[in-house]
Every structure is written in structure tokens, then in C-alpha cells.
Amino acid sequence: MTPQEVYRKACYLGKRIPEFEPTISKDAQFSYFYAHYIIEGRWELGESAISKNAKYSFWYAKNVIKGKWKLGEPAISKNARYSYWYATDVIKGKLPDFMHNQMILENNEYTKEYVELIK
């Protein structure tokens, strides 16, 4: 089964499928969906895949961890939009130094909004 098929089956059943969790844990998108919608909480097995993807790292921090998530910060820092959203929606302030420095170097529309946020 593919990660998507495992996720769909879990949705259909309305519960976890432990024997297929190693399969789904290899995919960032479906690991996030599985944690958020099926487990409704943190899922350490899927965190490695999620942490490599800026989009799903942001959503995992915001909706599952509900706070700062160091493991996902390196991926998030590579995307100005998700870095800005991480600052506004998760941290609610200044990014950690390495993310802050990366955001400032980006010099785009999100950088300007971020600078206004931390003033």
C-alpha cells in the first residue's frame, strides 16, 4: 500500500492502522494528515518525514504541536512564507536567530511584514 492508500483506509476506518504506520511515516504530507486527523496529536514516527518539508513542518507545528517545533525549523527557514507564518501564528514574535537571519536575507514581501511584526 502507498502512504496515500494507508491514510485513506485509516480515514474510512476512523482509527489508526499500526501495522501500516511505517509505510505512511515515509511521506511528509500523509504523515501530517495522519497525525492531525487520525491520531489527533503528536506522531513521532512521522516526524522525520514531516521535518524535511517546510509546508508540513509549519502545519504540524501550528495544528499538532501547537507551538514551537525545533525539528521542523530548518525546513521552514528555507521558505519565507512559512517562516513568516511560523513567526506570526506559532511563535507569535521573533524567529529563532538562524531563522531570523535567513528571513532578513530573503528581502521579499514577507521580510518586510516580518520586520514590522518584530518592531
Image (spheres, rainbow, N blue to C red):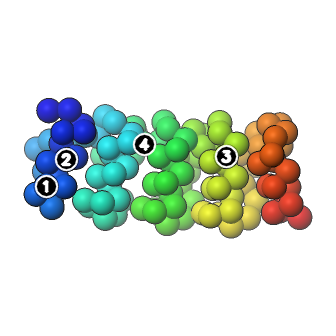
Res. 94 in view: yes
Question: Who is closer to the viewer here, 25 or 71?
Answer: 25
Q: Nearer the viewer, mark 1 or mark 4?
A: 1
Question: Who is closer to the viewer here, 102 or 29?
Answer: 29
| Cα–Cα gap, marks 1 and 3 | 33 Å
In primary-sequence order, the first of circles 4 and 2 is 2
Check disc 3 and report the residue beneath it: 81
Residue type, mark 4 in image: Ile
Check disc 1 and report the residue beneath it: 12
User: Farthest right residue?
Assistant: 119
Residue type, mark 3 in image: Arg
Q: Could you say which disc has been placed on residue 8 in the image?
A: 2
Q: Are marks 1 and 4 in contact (CB under 8 Å)?
A: no
In primary-sequence order, the first of circles 3 and 2 is 2
Q: Is residue 61 left or right of residue 109?
A: left
Q: Secondary structure at mark 2?
A: helix
Check disc 4 and report the residue beneath it: 50
Residue type, mark 2 in image: Arg
| Cα–Cα gap, marks 1 and 4 | 23 Å
In primary-sequence order, the first of circles 1 and 3 is 1
Give the quarter of the figure containing the N terminus: top left
Which image quadrant for residue 3?
top left
